[in-house]
Each structure stands twice: as structure tokens, then as C-alpha cells.
Image (tube, grey):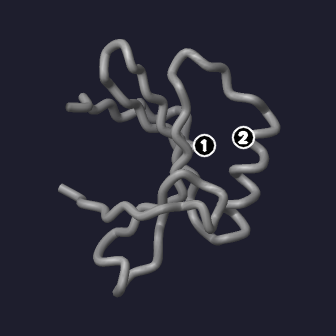
Amino acid sequence: MCRYYITDGAKFGADYLLYPGDPLLFHAQFTVRILEHATPIKPALLAGSARGSHAARKHLLLASVSMLTYCAAFYRPGCMQIQPQQITLL
């Protein structure tokens, strides 16, 4: 099981940053953007997020959250053939 640390991602134009270990010892591996599940993704938002994470040398992770079912699905652009991981939010 892989565990990540979460911090604020505003410095990189994201909602959150994910670290593979202690943020004092590791660099962030992912920038995370949280999107409402029912809302379509705007191309400009996707392009801007991708450019920002690429410039920071981090992977972009999109999190789709459904407030009706309290579930989240995670997508990594460029890897859309992989089934999204779903978790239940408590």
C-alpha cells in the first residue's frame, strides 16, 4: 500500500500536492485538481493545469468528486486507458 502526504498546492496552481513521503524529505510527485463529478472539464482549465504541473515537473492528477454518493475517482491524463481508482469519502 502506497501512502502519500497532502499539502496545499496553491503555489503550483493546484488544489493539493501529493508527496510519496514526508514533505521535509521528498519532493511532491503529483499536483491534484479537484473537480465536481457532474461538471464538464473545460479545455482551458485542463490545458492550464497540465502546463503548470509540467513546468513544475510533477504529474497532474484529476480528482472527480460526487457529493451525492460521497465517492471520488482519480484520473491521470495520458493514462486514461487505466480504470480510475474510486474511494468512498467518510
**Nearest the eye: 87 or 85:** 87
Element on which disc 2 rests: helix
Disc 2 target residue: 46
Q: Residue at x 75, y 29 (%)?
A: 42
Q: Position of residue 46 (x, y in %)?
A: 72, 40
Q: Position of residue 57 (x, y in %)?
A: 63, 71
Asked if disc 1 and disc 2 are in contact, CB closer than 8 Å, the reply is yes
Instruction: Count residues near mark 1 (Cα–Cα under 10 Å), then give few for <14, some for 14-19, many for 20+.
Output: few
Q: Amino acid at mark 1?
A: Pro
**Res 4 quadrant in image:** bottom left
- Residue 82 drawn above or below residue 14: above
**Nearest the eye: 11 or 79:** 11
Instruction: Report whether 7 appears left or right of 49.
Output: left
- Residue 78 drawn above or below residue 84: below
Q: Position of residue 63 (x, y in %)?
A: 48, 38
Q: Position of residue 45 (x, y in %)?
A: 74, 40
Q: Earlier in the sequence, mark 1 or mark 2?
A: 2
Q: Quadrant of the C terminus?
A: top left
